[in-house]
Amino acid sequence: MTTPINILLIEDNLGDAKLTAKALSRAKIENTLYVVDDGMKAMDFFYQRGEYKDAPRPDLVLLDLNLPKKDGREILQEIKADPSLLKIPVLILSTSQSMEDVDTSYRLHANSYIKKPVDFPGFMEVIRSIDSYWMGVVRLPAMG
Amino acid sequence: MNKPITGLRAVFSQLPLKVAGVLVFICLLPTLLQLLGADFSSAPPVSPADFDELDGKAFRELAFSGMSGSFTHTILEWTATIIALFTIVLAFAHFIVRRDIVTPVVAFALLAAGTMDAFHTLAADRLISASANNQDLIPFTWAICRTFNAIIPLTALLMLFFMRRWSVEAAPRRSVWVVAGFALLLAILSALIIDYAATSAALPQTMFPDATITRPWDVYPLVIYAFSGFLLYPLFLRKVTNYFALALWLSVIPDVATQLHMALGSTALFDHHFNVAHFMKIIAYAVPCLGLIADYVRTYRQVEVEVEERKLAQNMVEQHVAIVQEKSAELAASEARVQAIIDTAFDMIIVIDKKGIVESVNPSVKREFGYEPSEVIGQNIKMLMPNPYQEEHDGYLAAYHDTGVAKAIGKSRDVSARRKDGTVFPVSLSVGEMQLDSECMFVGILQNVSKQKAAEREKTEMLVDLQRSNADLEKFAYVASHDLQEPLRMIASYTWLLKEDYGGKLGEEADEYIDFAVDGAKRMQALIQELLTYSKIGQSSIELRETDSQEIAEQVQLDLKIMIAEAGAEVVAKGLPRITADPIQLRQLLQNLVSNGIKFSKSETPRVTVSAKRDGNRWMFSISDNGIGFDMQYKDRIFEIFQRLHTRTEYAGSGMGLAICDRIVHRHGGQIEVQSELGKGTTFSFSMAVDDNTD
């Protein structure tokens, strides 16, 4: 019995957040999903500030690019600029197909760029592959 | 005789030889006849002793016969005198017509001589009293008359010759005085001589019957005649060219003959030579008279010819006047026509001179400019122009005048014009140059193009609007379909989730509702996807490059592998060329057409053939199937967006596929076409540019 891994989903669309949660709940690996709906809250979560004083350190981050207050690109840049956070794998999960967004994300050291499929079966498939790849195949760095 | 004669030889060559010959013959005739035995002497005078034994009747007979010499002499002399009178009458008539003083002057000289002859005759006949006896009076007065006769015309001619030199005759009034003065002088001179001859009792002896020169006094006139005939008349004739003068000259011949007979032949009164000499004198008087008559005839003929010529000239003038009148009428009619055209022309017509001053305008100018013609004519054309044309115009005219390089001539250009009220309107101006009476003029034809300009502007604005609205529409379609995706994804996902989690739990009817919702969301997603593709083709710039269409066709077959397999279809694509195209769009195009061919198949094995053949610098592609085909009346409709010929239950699809194809071909500069027959199959064809590198 391993300790469940902590996943932070930064997503302003509650529908998507719920879908993601739904999909992850069917995942094989035990996980705890935390959801924040704007960039400022995300940063508070990382630095365990305010209401996220007791928040755990996430093992995997699922980041939407278009967010209120502070968008996904800034969050990515800040995480990867902070030595204490840069080891955390960040997967971009976006509806955008634009090559520019893909390029920008990888330049800012995103670990993966995933386009949200438009249909639910496809979406479930993607979450399932994240589950098997990032939580099964890949060895994640040690925390701390 | 019309040409002035120069040179003495030339003067002699003008002598009418025939006339001269006839004269010489007449002069020789009496001598010839004498040689043949003729004798022209009158009966010898009767001596007083002859009357002694005669009775009264015989006495009278003898007395009369004794007078025969005297009678003959009188007849001969009187004839000469009458001719002289006749000559002077003719000469005066001539003078009145011609105002030529030579003729009357010479004729007066002849008349003077004739008058003296008359005196000589009358005296000889004792009709007037004379002191001397007849034996002396007759030869003496004869010799005096002859000398006078020879000298006077000569003097007159010489005088006139010099007068002519001094141009005295030019004034007609003076010529009358000259003639009158000369006549008076002659009258006085002859009267004095006659008076002397009549009153002198003892006259010098003039007849020497035994000498060689029987009458020496007659030698002087002989010499004068010869001298004048050979030298003076020819000199004089150089200046006067009429028959009278010529006849005067010719009269020297009988004059000389007269003197020869008298000086050398006559030994007694009324002898042969005496009578012949008197006859010759008549000839000598007659010749100038005939000359005058000849002049009359000539003058009359000349006048006739002149009258005839004048009539002809008059006719010609009348004809010309008629022609000119006719032409003038034609010209006036033609001018009226042209004027009518100019006046009714809707375009403005302005004529200016080379300095830019307005010469004429047509009524349209008033309509457009608001100026009366009188306000414009005579003014500089610049008044009809706004600046900067106004300032440039003088420069144009000067430049054209100097260099011949025209900025406006021969072409139409758009300029601005200014009305009387100062408003400016656009005109199309064409200028022509014309040469009028060696003066350069310019004709300007102006057309008010305000309406055209406005229409043009409107059209341009509309085009810009249309392009903008098209672009807006494209953008809208893209943004809309892109942004629609997000909420649609929610609907699709959650209806799906609803179906998965609650399917079979809410009752059959609920399951059916959920199915419809799921299906609708799915279709909507497909539609939006297609719409996005369609608008992307319109928006993004295409990247034309060398593309192997065979390779693209093979990739399409791979992409459609499942579909082909499921339909059991056969897709043939062989020997396709390298072309210039956007590979991504070409792939989309071929994929849509091939999948279309498979989709609309009949029960038998669907077969789709992709081929291409060269047509000039393009490749003609054909995609043929053996499918259901369609009615050709829909051939345009199938390329419109969201247009379908079948229900979704028969054949799935969004109705965007062919619209996308049409757009792709269009963006490649081609046109997609379709040939179809219901139940037999369909062939789509389109052209693509050849690959520049392989060509």
Image: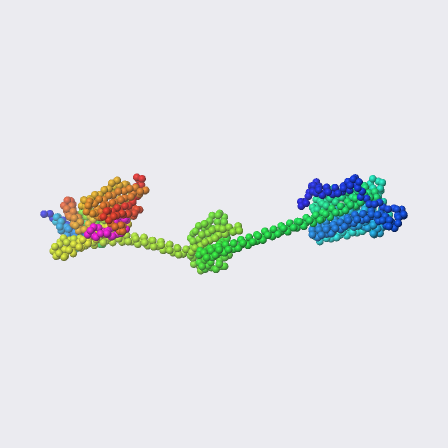
User: Horizontally, is B146 left or right of B399 in the view?
Assistant: right
Quadrant location of the N terminus of chain B in the rendered image: top right
Q: Looking at the picture, how far across and down is residue B314, in whole percent?
A: 60, 52
Q: Looking at the picture, how far across and down is residue B378, in whole percent?
A: 51, 56
Q: Which residues are magenta?
A: B636-663
Decide if residue B148 is in sight here.
Answer: no
Q: Looking at the picture, how far across and down is residue B118, in whole percent?
A: 80, 50
Quadrant location of the C terminus of chain B in the rendered image: top left
Residue positioned 81% across, 44% down in the render: B41
Residue in front for this viewpoint, B14 or B262: B262
User: Horizontally, is B11 left or right of B347 in the view?
Assistant: right
Dominant secondary structure (helix, strand or loop) of the stretch shown in magenta: loop
Residue in front for this viewpoint, B257 or B651: B257
Residue positioned 79% across, 41% down in the render: B38
Decide if residue B421 is in sight here.
Answer: yes
Colour scheme shown: rainbow
Q: Looking at the picture, how far across and down is residue B448, in whole percent?
A: 42, 56
User: Horizontally, is B248 left or right of A134 in the view?
Assistant: right
Residue in front for this viewpoint, B368 or A111: B368
User: Horizontally, is B336 left or right of B217 in the view?
Assistant: left
Is the residue B322 above or below the residue B232 in the image? below
Q: Is B421 part of what is drawn in magenta?
A: no
Which residue occupies the extreme left position in the image?
A1
Residue in front for this viewpoint, B560 or B286: B286
Is the residue B424 above or below the residue B228 in the image? below
Task: Tally the marks.
Answer: 0
Q: Is B649 part of what is drawn in magenta?
A: yes
